[in-house]
């Protein structure tokens, strides 16, 4: 009975977060679809825009992921004012990290040219990202507000703000991109601005809700106390920095793997891109579940209910197993249908891409399952503020094992892109089993400490 309650609690928290993440992904996809109407060069630039935007955004705002668990633990310990102090410091951090993000977006052209990209594509990317950068600060503040809302179990407001963002983006991007609906024709810049502007809209909406709802008064979120609660800022940095380094390292790892795939030729790169796009779209529910697990574990830790800690983790693992199994079945049963969304025509080249994608879908499906378990365990440990160990495990398995193994299989054993995919599989699987060991050690340590205290 208690396990079922934990399962329902985990699902209830996870699905609004997952749906909000999906809406954000679809918003970016919509902007890229509109961008493709500007020609083949703009379509090609879209891949770079997507890569830069995801790498920079996730790399920086991952430091805010600890805000939810920290706010949640303070609330569980019946300290709403302290929870508000943590939340406020998270908002302050979001303002600080928006500054380097804006600089990278605004000067992306020379960075891309330095990385070997054509000046024409780099120019399109910079035009889009400069429009996007205008509202980066309120967008990051929206992220900080959303993290705090998850921590106080008001995740439905995160979903509402994401829906509002999408509703604003649909006409605004079309109007500013093509001079329709009585709006000026800003072209590529307009598309970037529209996507970024939704962050401002979402931020204003959340502030409006927090000001009006009596529930939030206990947090005193708008009573400035940055200096008196500075220790919470240092705690966010100390606990959140390893998460930032872990996620940045993994994003860079995937970028390097994609570059290595490009050395294998157009067919390998195209097949890998097809499977990567589907995997990225379907991985969104996993992120929502991971965030829910981390916050609920932190609540249980704050309440000193360590049996609930174990049940929450088991519930999250169960839900992840269901999601992972469904994705694996989809990738095994319908790889050609999935490929048809990106590969058109009946040429020999198209068939080669599809045949290779069929194999990669199978490997990605299994990798997806183990990567899901790995991330659930990492997020659950985050509820204990245990973030440094997962960072080092990620670096070891991704960079010291997965990358060398993938390159050896791809170039020395001549397995091509399949070898690179197997290197990634070994990395996430090894990481999953290591994190399982860490989680069990954590639970044994807790029981031992409780026994000693008794």
Image: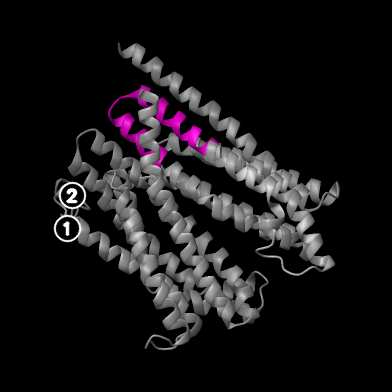
Left or right: 71 in relation to 49: left
- Residue at 49% x, 74% y: name it: 129
Residue 284: say if magenta.
no
Q: Main secondary structure of the magenta part?
A: helix
Secondary structure beneath dot 2 equals helix
Its colouring scheme is one colour
The number of numbered badges drawn on the structure is: 2
Front one among 453 and 204: 204
Q: Work out which quarter of the rendered image holds the N terminus and state it.
A: top left
Picture layout, residue 16 above or below residue 23: above
The picture places residue 413, in percent across and down from the top left corner, at: 85, 46
* Camera sees residue 349: yes
| Residue at numbered disc 2 | 216
Picture layout, residue 446 above or below residue 38: above
Picture layout, residue 262 above or below residue 405: below
Q: Are marks 1 and 2 in contact (CB under 8 Å)?
A: yes
Rate crowding at label 2 as few (under 14), some (14 to 19) or many (20 or more) other CA atoms within 10 Å: some
Q: Work out which quarter of the rendered image holds the C terminus and state it.
A: top left
Left or right: 189 in relation to 304: right
**Range shown magenta:** 292-321
Query: Which of pointers 1 and 2 lies earlier in the amino acid sequence?
Result: 1
Left or right: 241 in relation to 78: right
- Residue at 51% x, 80% y: name it: 127
């Amino acid at each position: 009975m208690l396990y079922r309650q934990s399962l329902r609690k985990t699902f209830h928290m996870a699905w609004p977060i997952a749906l909000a993440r999906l809406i954000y992904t679809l918003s970016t996809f919509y902007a890229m679809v509109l961008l493709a109407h500007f020609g083949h060069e703009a379509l090609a630039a879209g891949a770079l825009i997507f890569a830069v935007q995801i790498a920079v955004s996730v790399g920086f705002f991952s430091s805010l992921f600890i805000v939810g668990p920290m706010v949640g633990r303070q609330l569980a310990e019946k300290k709403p004012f302290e929870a508000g102090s943590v939340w406020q410091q998270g908002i302050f951090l979001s303002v600080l990290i928006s500054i380097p993000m804006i600089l990278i977006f605004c000067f992306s052209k020379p960075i891309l040219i330095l990385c070997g990209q054509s000046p024409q594509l780099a120019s399109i990317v910079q035009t889009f990202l400069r429009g996007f950068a205008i509202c980066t600060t309120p967008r990051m503040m929206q992220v900080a507000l959303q993290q705090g809302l998850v921590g106080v179990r008001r995740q439905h407001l995160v979903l509402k703000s994401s829906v509002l963002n999408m509703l604003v983006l649909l006409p605004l991007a079309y109007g500013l991109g093509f001079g329709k609906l009585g709006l000026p024709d800003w072209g590529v810049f307009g598309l970037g601005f529209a996507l970024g502007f939704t962050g401002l809209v979402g931020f204003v909406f959340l502030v409006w809700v927090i000001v009006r709802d009596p529930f939030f008064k206990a947090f005193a979120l708008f009573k400035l106390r940055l200096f008196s609660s500075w220790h919470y800022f240092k705690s966010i940095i100390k606990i959140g920095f390893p998460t930032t380094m872990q996620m940045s390292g993994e994003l860079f790892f995937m970028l390097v793997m994609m570059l290595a795939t490009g050395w294998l030729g157009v067919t390998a790169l195209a097949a890998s891109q097809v499977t990567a796009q589907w995997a990225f779209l379907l991985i969104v529910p996993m992120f929502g579940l991971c965030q829910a697990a981390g916050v609920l574990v932190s609540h249980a830790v704050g309440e000193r209910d360590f049996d609930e800690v174990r049940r929450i983790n088991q519930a999250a693992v169960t839900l992840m197993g269901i999601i992972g199994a469904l994705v694996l079945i989809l990738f095994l049963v319908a790889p050609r249908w999935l490929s048809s969304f990106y590969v058109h025509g009946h040429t020999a080249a198209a068939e080669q891409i599809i045949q290779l994608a069929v194999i990669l879908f199978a490997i990605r499906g299994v990798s997806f399952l183990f990567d899901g378990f790995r991330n659930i365990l990492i997020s659950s440990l985050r509820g204990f503020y245990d973030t440094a160990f997962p960072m080092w495990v990620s670096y070891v398995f991704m960079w010291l094992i997965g990358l060398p193994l993938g390159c050896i299989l791809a170039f020395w054993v001549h397995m091509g892109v399949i070898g690179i995919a197997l290197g990634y599989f070994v990395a996430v699987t090894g990481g999953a089993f290591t994190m399982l060991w860490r989680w069990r050690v954590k639970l044994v340590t807790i029981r031992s400490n409780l026994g000693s205290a008794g």
